Amino acid sequence: MLVGGGAAGFFTAINAAEKAPHLKIAILERGKEVLTKVKVSGGGRCNVTHAEFIPKELSQNYPRGEKELLGPFHTFMTGDTIAWFEARGVQLKIEEDGRMFPVTDSSQTIIDCFLTETLRLGIEVLRNQSVKDVNPTEAGWQVITNTETFTAQKLVMATGSNPKIWKLMEKLGHSIVAPVPSLFTFNIEDERITDLQGLSKEAEVKVLNENGKVLLESEGPLLITHWGMSGPAILKLSAWGARLLEPLKYHFNIVVNWMPHHTDVEVLELLMNLKQEFPKQTIYKYPRFELPKRLWQRLVTVSGLDATEIWADVSKKKLQQLAKQITQGTFQVHGKSTFKEEFVTAGGIDLKEVNFKTFQSKVNPQLYFAGEILNIDAITGGFNFQNAWTGGYIAAQALTEDL
């Protein structure tokens, strides 16, 4: 029996039924709908996995779970995921940033694939079954829901970040790592980015602690939004910093370098060269260093330059200010916002209590875990789903061994 009608639950059930067709398998889902997170992921396109084909490098995208997933990725990872879906008529494509989607660009393709497989394999999908209690028995498990009581030889918990289920797992002897948000955007109110939403630029971003020391840093596309900053550069920081940023109550400073790998001294030199090269040109009008025009103009203005000022007339002091704004702009973060509908939590079953050769509980041998119920989470880009596929596949192979 599987609890949780999401990606990990369906993938485990399908693989278990294929390996052991004689088994009676059921998925219990507390809601009216199954696979709801699959439906909204990737903006409704479903970011199935990521085109990273080396286990070690794939594992480095998991702030929690990097060490534990390395072995499992040698058993089942990206290439296996692609082959699994292709064998069931679902072709995947790779986008420029490495994310992989169904060629239909619709998450419904993945949902239909799973529902077709459960029908074909005779897997029961029981909706509106909210699990109230789980008890070990001599024969395996008793699962009590809001409407009935089920018995099962083996149990797979694939309920994602569900505090009620975590409580039940604690009752069974498991330790729970307290949940904190991961994958969120930064709320910033600042004249330099006001009304620039939608603008994106490759940037280096550093998170500072109260003493101005660098806590975290990342590089990648930074997206300016209505409420502040997002994009991979920010989301990576929120994932790797999930446990560091929570005690700060999401109030801290970041330093943004809009010209990665350049210092303020190097940029000042480039600006001084422009002063020689284009003495009569209006600085404000012509963006430099591939900075988006509106961002360039905002940085020029906050550096104290006049909109009509030409290169010949600008002082070195003002150019120093501009160089600093380009490479060391400090922004105050006041809170966070959820990244789209793809809310991800760091926390869950303590990884020390799980055998990652089988995704089996070390506390209860007839109990298995898959997906985000474990204290595993990833940066954005299809990695959280890959964890679900890998764990689900391995758990399915292990739990069918002696049945």
Image (cartoon, grey):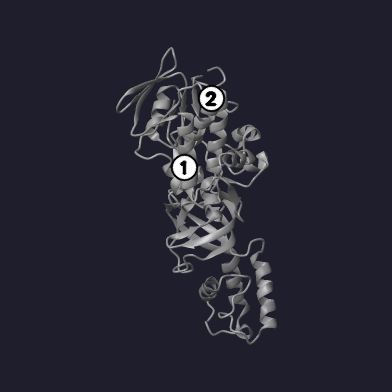
Q: Residue at x 58, y 84 (%)?
A: 282
Vertical placement of 216 versus 167: above or below? below
SS under mark 1: helix
Q: Nearer the viewer, residue 11 or 160?
A: 11
Q: Which mark is residue 112?
A: 1
Q: Residues within 10 Å of mark 1 (few under 14, many from 20)?
A: few
Judging by the rendered image, the residue that carries numbered circle 2 is 360
The image shows residue 306 at horizontal and vertical percentages of: 52, 82
The image shows residue 196 at horizontal and vertical percentages of: 47, 68
Can residue 343 be seen?
no
Looking at the picture, which amino acid does disc 2 mark?
Answer: Gln
The image shows residue 159 at horizontal and vertical percentages of: 43, 34
Q: Is residue 182 left or right of residue 292?
A: left
Looking at the rendering, in which quadrant would you find the N terminus? top left
Q: Residues within 10 Å of mark 2 (few under 14, many from 20)?
A: many
Going from the N terminus, do you reach mark 2 or mark 1 first?
Answer: 1
Q: Which mark is residue 396?
A: none
Identity of the residue furthest to the bottom in this view: 280
Q: Residue at x 53, y 75 (%)?
A: 297
